[in-house]
Image: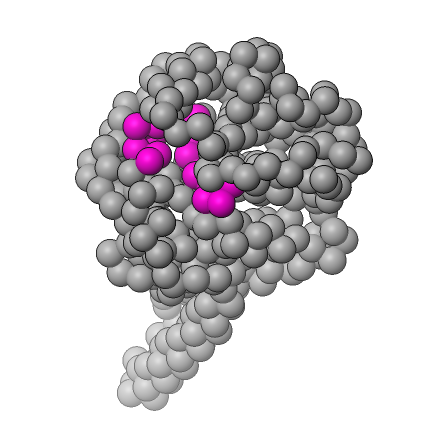
Amino acid sequence: MQLRKMERIKISIIIPVFNSEECLEELNNQIEKSLAGFHSYELILVNDKSNDDSWKIICEICKKNNKAIGISLRKNAGQDNAIMAGLKISKGEYIIIMDDDLQHSPNDILKLYDECIKGYDVCFGLFQKKKQKLWKNIGSWFNGKLSEKLLSKPKGIYLSPFKVIKSEIGKEIIEYNGPYPYIDALLLSITDNITQIPIDHHARYKGRSRFNFFNSFSVFLKHSTGYSIYPLRLAIYIGFTAAFLAIIYGCYTLYDYFNGSGKVEGWESTVLLIILFGGIILICLGIIGEYVGRIFLTINKKPQYTIERIVSKKIADNNLDKRNCSNADND
């Protein structure tokens, strides 16, 4: 199936979209204004099965902007999976990844690009001050520290959702076919030729963010079980520690008994210990179960995403039913 003609494009801008109908027109306008003198780019908007009119607006943008491409997923797949769909059809020598709510300013696109072309594989945008809720900042800090331990993230590097990567790195990323991609983890596993530059973080243009605690916890699970076996080792350490404490407590109980106490008491502490060690066992089983579940879904080839439609002035509107968009970028 011929979808796109070969053309030399310098920058591909990939934006996963979810329930951002109020932001998309302004986002497109700012991108066009910021790149007015830079003609060699494409804008890829990936609709992650929004519940509002985001897809309708994306189609309108594609009618007016001949550099825009709209991708609609059949079901909500998650931000990283939507980015994978965009990477699959991107043609740029450098790929910008950014959010859809204008907290990432299009004015910074060329700043990131100019830094990356100095010879880096990846350039992250370093936000000096984030205009978001406190719990999000805490979660971001925690995930950053976790990345240093689990993903060998260089200290001082902020894994920003606003970044530019070389196309060679993008091609390596889409070789990953597991159902739970995590873009930053894949980047760190591919290259350490990474830099960052300071940029501003802006308030959301309109509407409210749908990113909640459960989304943050999902990122934590991707960190901990998707790209590292450290949690399994941690479960072993917890098990040995719990067993050691149980032995110490048992020795203390025997000593107290033979020392003349002879009293049978302490049922409260016994119940608490049972609850404690029962909880530890369940946590360890949960960690193991998470790994087993991910292995099961990977073996059964759960798709990262499925594409319903691709629209653009340059691409005929296609009805697709392709697992992982395997043929969507055939020339």
Eyeballing the image, is 203 above or below 300?
Answer: above
* Residue in view at x 28 percent, y 23 percent: 203
Please tell me which residue lies in front, 130 or 221. Answer: 130
Residue 104 inside the magenta-drawn segment: yes
Task: Find the magenta span and give its range.
Answer: 92-110
Indicate the quadrant containing the C terminus: top left, top right, bottom left or bottom right. top right
Residue 289 x, y percent position in the rendering: 61, 58
Say whether residue 190 is left or right of residue 119: right
Q: Position of residue 65 (x, y in %)?
A: 52, 17
For residue 166, side relative to residue 302 (left or right): left
Within the magenta stretch, is there residue 154? no
- For image coordinates 46% across by 37% down, the residue present is 11
Q: How many marks?
A: 0
- Give me the residue at 61% from left, 31% from top: 76
Quarter occupied by residue 148: bottom left
Q: Looking at the figure, which quarter contains the N terminus?
A: top right
In the image, is residue 295 above or below residue 167?
Answer: below
What colour scheme was applied to this rendering of the protein? Answer: one colour
Relative image position of residue 62 (x, y in whole percent): 57, 17
Left or right: 229 as drawn, with respect to 262? right
Query: Is residue 268 in view?
Result: no
The residue at 35%/81% (across/down) is 248
